[in-house]
Amino acid sequence: MADVAFQPKHFLSDKVAHFTESVIREMTRQAMLYGAVNLAQGFPDFPAPAEIKRAAQEAVANDVNQYAITWGAKNLRNAIARQMKEWQGIPVDPETQITVCCGSTEAMISTLLAVCNAGDEVVIFEPFYENYGPDSVLSGAKPRFVKLRPPSDPEGEWTFDERELRSAFHDHTKAIILNTPNNPTGKVFTRAELELIRDLCLKFNVIAITDEIYEHILYDDTKHISIASLDGMGDRTVTINGLSKSYSVTGWRVGWAVGPPSVTGAIRKVHDFLTVGAPAPLQEAGAAALGLPNAYYENLAYGYRTRRDHLMPALTEAGFRCFRPRGAYYVMTDINAFGFSDDVTFTKYLVKEIGVAAVPGSSFYNDPKDGASQVRFAFCKREETLDEAGRRLLKLKK
Ligand SMILES: Cc1ncc(COP(=O)(O)O)c(C=O)c1O
């Protein structure tokens, strides 16, 4: 038999052709390359709470070093169920409704793989957290995007057009992915907006998959509402959350999906074959984390509000138009004033010449043109880091 010439593409799945590498993670690599202040990727540069680090150390010392139960250590599942009841009034059975995963990232892809068939559609608000599009494609579904539009007044709210949302739902719609508080816009969905989404889910028999990883990071008296707490949504919602943002431990890789027992059964199967389980000692530390007193969460939100109010004036001073976030820890900005051709050219200039890494807005949109005048900054950083970024950004004024 004659040898076949090596064709690199032959070995690649068509699926991966539909998406590129994460721009956010790429910006972090560039920040390291140029010695830039990294306001691109959303990870804190300050320590995690001492209590939970101690709990992790104790778990390792006590030899919690082997596989945990595939769908999550009992202590952590009990803590998650307790907190969902306390914070959102949602009753959860830890035995049949929770799957602990390697971060909320794995919880999201496991859920989509568990619920989607080829030909299904998934409604996604854009700008979106960049994993959702590839996650839908990997699960065989087709993403269908609905725009969140920035306010004309920077103090206002990002909104969506009700007609556009309604027309995104039809017979092939399997799921809607929600993210509230939202990355990258900082939008916190209101009860009225969630009720409209609920009504559409009921009408078109659609499941809501809701990423609530920024649940505790809220400003300006905004309240977080889980769509699972609305009438009719308990048995058609998967709520995703994790340790990363609430406890400043993005590298621990512990997250979870909470859903009705039938869907949870399917998520657990996918999760088992994907990763078997999340890190066992860090799940024990997670149980300790979820037991922190309410004052911890008040301080967390206060700390982020202070950082937001630190960074936004510096950005404005440098010439950005900022949209005030109501939750999460990012500021989306408009860069029109700088006269660059697009967001990617601008962020390349920013990281290399100014020494600050940010994320080009186009990475949050299906059509890059839609984000060409936007750039996102993360403010989950120490005050010194934000000050240094502010000083460097002033060079833009020259
Ligand atoms: C909206 C959103 N979901 C999920 C994640 C990732 O979470 P995890 O670390 O739990 O995988 C991020 C991280 O930035 C995020 O912004």
Image (cartoon, rainbow, N blue to C red):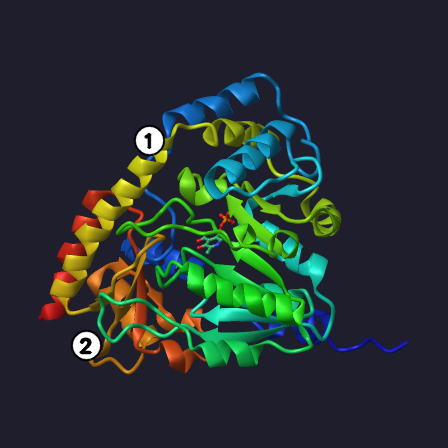
Mark sitting earlier along the chain (2/1): 1
* Disc marking residue 338: 2
Give how far across and how far down residue 38 sits, in percent.
31, 54
Q: Check the image and name the residue furthest to the front.
A: 231
- Few, some or many C-alpha atoms within 10 Å of disc 2 (few <14, some 14-19, many ≥20)? some
Figure label count: 2
Give how far across and how far down residue 42 sits, in percent.
38, 52
Left or right: where 27 falls relative to 320: right
Above or below: residue 24 compared with residue 369: above
Above or below: residue 364 compared with residue 88: below
Q: Residue at x 63, y 66 (%)?
A: 202
Q: Which residue is mark 1?
A: 295
Residue 53 location, quadrant: top left
Confirm whether residue 20 shows in the render. Answer: no
Could you say which is closer to the camera, residue 229 or residue 135?
229
Left or right: where 354 falls relative to 14: left
Q: Residue at x 41, y 73 (%)?
A: 160
Q: Quadrant for the N terminus, please.
A: bottom right
Q: Check the image and name the residue furthest to the right.
A: 1
Could you say which is closer to the camera, residue 38 or residue 147?
147
Q: Residue at x 38, y 62 (%)?
A: 184
> Which amino acid is tagged 2?
Phe
Q: Check the image and name the residue furthest to the top.
A: 62
- Label 2, label 1: how far apart the Cα atoms are: 42 Å
- Few, some or many C-alpha atoms within 10 Å of disc 1 (few <14, some 14-19, many ≥20)? few
> Which amino acid is tagged 1?
Ala
Q: Residue at x 20, y 44 (%)?
A: 383
